[in-house]
Amino acid sequence: MRSAPHRLAVFGTLMLSAACIATFGCSRIPGRPGPGPEVIRPDEVFDFATLYKENCAACHGSNGKNGAAISLANPVYPAVAGEQTIQQTITKGVPGGLMPAFARTSGGALTEKQVTLLAQGIMQQWSTPNLLAGTNPPPYAATLPADANRGQQAYATACARCHGEDGEGNPGDPKTGAGKLGSIVNPAYLALISNQDLRSIVIAGRPDQGMPDWRSDATQPLTDQQITDIVAWLASKRTAEPGQPYH
């Protein structure tokens, strides 16, 4: 039988251990992993760089360019679109295109504050104040009635030299492949891009891919009517069921 002093020593050790646990918490128990980094809730992310990387970079490029979608780092685009339109586009997406709605109010995952931060960040990062001062840029959205036949004529004047007479592309240099451009009337391509996206590209260009804006590659800058008609001509090339038919 253990002696009374021994039992008292064991009891004292247990009491001391209990006191330590009460004082320092379970996190100090030997063998227990230490506290990990704090995880921020998705709706509490308010850093533009993080929001852009997680929601925009996959399509628009990590630095706002060289992505599959229009270049946001092209200062002509934010100048023509404006912050309000960019915010509305992030909120509701692009009807008829691949860009989905990102705002919770439209079925997305971002809060209203996060959408606002994204729109403001795009303007702060990539817009240039007074970039188009003294010019008369076409409006972001079409308002004029469109004529595809006139659009084909405008296309031949302003676009065919690079994109081919019928929009089927340019083979480029046969030796190096430099200047090669794919078809912009390919039904699969047209099925994936909206009329507004086509208009935005014609107006703002794609400088990351060597395409000038509405002013740069014609004797006269393209007018609002010409751009509207060119988009109508391109849209007329869409098919109801694009893709390779199966037999």
Image (spheres, grey):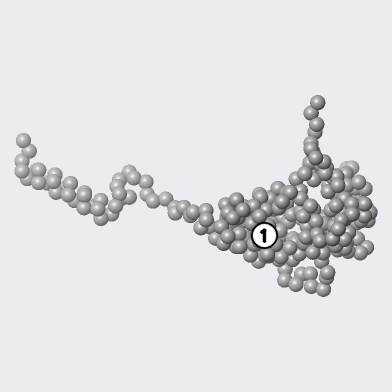
Residue 175, visible in the rendered structure:
yes
> Residue 88 sits in which quadrant?
bottom right
Residue at image x 77%, y 62%? 140
Q: Where the C terminus falls, by quadrant? A: top right
Q: In the shown orientation, is residue 117 left or right of residue 9?
A: right
Residue 172, visible in the rendered structure:
no
Residue 60 spot, x, y in % from top left: 69, 53
Residue at image x 9%, y 43%? 7
Q: Nearer the viewer, residue 15 or 114?
A: 114
- Residue furthest top in the image: 247
Residue 129 spot, x, y in % from top left: 72, 71
Q: Which residue is mark 1?
A: 88
Q: In the shown orientation, is residue 190 left or right of residue 110?
A: right
Residue 50 spot, x, y in % from top left: 58, 56
Q: Where the N terminus falls, by quadrant? A: top left
Q: What amino acid is labelled 1 in the image?
A: Gln
